[in-house]
Image: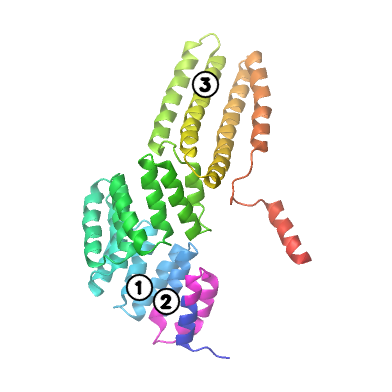
Amino acid sequence: MRVSAAASIERARALTHLGRWSEAAEALRPALADPSTSAEAWCLLARCELGQQRTAAALEAARRAVASDPDHEWAHRLIAIAALRLGDHDAAEAACRRALHLAPDLCESLHVLTTITLVRRGKGGGALAAEEIAQRNLVQNPDRALAWEGAADVAMARRHWDRAEHYARRGLAIDPQDGDLAMILGTALDRQGRAAEAGNAYAAAARANPHDHRARRAIGRLGLPMAGAALVLAKIGAIAGIRGAALWAGAPIAGLALVLALLIAGAYAGVELMAWRARRTLTPQLQTVAWRERKVAARGWLAASAVVAVILALRAIAVDDRVTAAVLALAVPLLLEARHRLPRPMGGPTGRLALAAQSIRRRLR
């Protein structure tokens, strides 16, 4: 039975809403061959390619849509999104402004332009220009959650946590199932030290999109310092390690091992104390999620410790520091055993053996 071009467009739209990208792309074949629907079909195909993280193919499909209909606003907006992902900020902004020329004050295009401005000019210099665009979007589209999300993004970039919270709450009042807004709200609350409220916001984000694991990971990071603090700690650790090796001139390997061990232990104890204080305010269900995620994070600490221990042990053997080598050699299996006993990340990548077992079980059913 032959499917009409219009019917294939409708079916593809329904499939894209479900995130079934490959099926939607296959359903578009009749519409792509029909000149009356080809522009819309190429746009839908570009959306499917973006959903599958095939950005170059999405850009090509969007350009085919423009070739079919130069005044198709969505096609220009899709070019802007694909070009932004590929790092071509000039092309992204030009395409987005063309989309706005075709459909002035459209919420989606203003949101994309806000994002492009933030990325292109940097979070500092571009935040003011992006805020102007976001505020224009709010004025023109106050009933759209996406407009409030753009304003919240700018507030987050400027570290105005209270304003980001306000914008996120306004957007969620319009669309309570918006997972991105719930994530923004959770981050803004976390930065204000309100861990219990942040945990509830992250839980709402997880319910809105169960396949997005950002919310679960964010619950595990509640109360932890931001990335900037971690970078500073790493630099201090490197300097202290070098100085420690110089202080123990007679036994540089032992000195370096001691300094690094103390730094790792102190840093880990510090961040775990912050996480523990934040976890105490969560509901029992969220405490369980947070505790499991912190165990997963501990795997990384232990793996890093094992790598350091191996390097120092090899170096100790090279300089014939047998005592240090023996101590570190004993530490490595202990670290690896501890890492082995910790659980795998929830929702993390499944190993090949587990995938094979699942495949066998499906065949046996």
The structure residue drawn at horizontal position 25% and vertical position 62%, both measured from the top left corner, is 138
Residue on which disc 1 sits? 75
Where 343 falls versus 36 (above or below)?
Answer: above
Instruction: Rate crowding at label 2 as few (under 14), some (14 to 19) or many (20 or more) other CA atoms within 10 Å.
Output: many
Nearer to the camera, 295 or 349: 295
Name the dominant secondary structure of the magenta segment. Answer: helix
Q: Amino acid at mark 2?
A: Trp
Where 44 falls versus 179 (above or below)?
Answer: below
Mark earlier in primary sequence (2, 3): 2
The structure residue drawn at horizontal position 40% and vertical position 74%, both measured from the top left corner, is 43
Q: Amino acid at mark 1?
A: Ala
The magenta segment is: 14-40
The structure residue drawn at horizontal position 46% and vertical position 33%, both measured from the top left corner, is 274
Q: Identify the image quadrant of the C terminus.
A: bottom right
Mark earlier in primary sequence (1, 3): 1
Q: Is residue 105 magenta?
A: no
Q: In the rendering, at what x and y percent does residue 149 appear?
A: 33, 58
Q: Is residue 24 magenta?
A: yes
Residue on which disc 3 sits? 262
Q: Amino acid at mark 3?
A: Leu
Mark earlier in primary sequence (1, 2): 2
> Could you tell me how far apart the alpha carbons at marks 1 and 2 are, in whole angstroms?
8 Å
Disc 1 + disc 2, Cβ < 8 Å: yes
Residue on which disc 2 sits? 42
As helix, strand or loop, the secondary structure at mark 2 comes to helix
